[in-house]
Image (cartoon, helix red, strand yellow):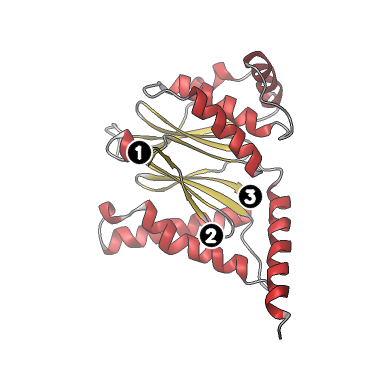
Amino acid sequence: MIEEPYRWVEAIATRRDYIEMQLATGSPVVALGYDEGILLLTVGQQKLFEIYDRIALGAIGHPGDIERLRMAAIELASTEGFTRSAADVSLRRLAYYSLSPVMKNAFEQIYGAPFLARLLFVEIGTSPADDLFLEVEYDGAINLRSSDGGNRPFAVLAATKKSAEQMAGLLSKRFQSGKDLPATLDLALDAWTVGQLKTDEAMPGEEELRRQRSERLGSGTVSAAVLERNTNRAVLFRAVEGSKLAPLIPK
């Protein structure tokens, strides 16, 4: 009986290694605030979704697990909005009291299948200071991205923690408030490129970064969507038009 807790800890460590290996080839996701809202960007298969009015989702992982979690988030938010009101639907409540416990439980039940997914949620507020960037890990851990006592206007998902740190480092150096959408798309693609580099490589210079970006985007499809703060449309979430992406992608 004494050995049982140690066996559980060993099984959890093995499970964590397995999940990290499964996520190792995932395409990074970048979320960036800009002057009119929040941008979500990735390259490859569709992994950007609207969840509820002011909330959107980006993800890395197995498509089936991402879809299960997406549908769960939509159902939870819709139920909350129906039983109370749309204004009562909160990203913090959705993550902390609903999705995180479900993912934590699946991860710790070693005889069941865990979720092979990392999630990045964004919630647009009435002003940039009210925007929220929140990550939920496969083990249920929540990262609320903030600095200097306030919420940072960006967040990233990557295949490894080292890649995510390098992406965040680039954004910390180059992010400036008040940028328009084309400039924000350009910066997001640079951050995505850094997330695709080998983590043992030094951060490339501007010229090398552009060369790497051109090379890596050559066979990929850029997927981008925004949550718009000031719009007359009922739906705040929309896909970015191809005409805005075309100038940023090498022929």
Looking at the image, which residue is at 44% across and 63% down?
98
Q: Would you name the residue on which mark 1 appears?
A: 236
Q: Which residue bears the numbered disc 2?
A: 140
**Distance of mark 3 from mark 1, alpha carbons?**
26 Å
10 Å crowding of disc 3: few (<14), some (14-19), many (20+): many
Q: Amino acid at mark 1?
A: Leu
- The foreground one among 160 and 125 is 160
Residue 64 rendering spot, x and y as whole percentages: 62, 56
Q: Position of residue 42 (x, y in %)?
A: 57, 35
Q: Amino acid at mark 2?
A: Gly
Q: Residue furthest bottom?
A: 1
Q: Residues within 10 Å of mark 1 (few under 14, many from 20)?
A: many
Assess whether mark 2 and mark 1 are in contact (beta carbons under 8 angstroms).
Answer: no
Question: Which mark lies nearer to you, 3 or 2?
Answer: 2
Q: Earlier in the sequence, mark 3 or mark 1?
A: 3
Q: Residues within 10 Å of mark 2 (few under 14, many from 20)?
A: many
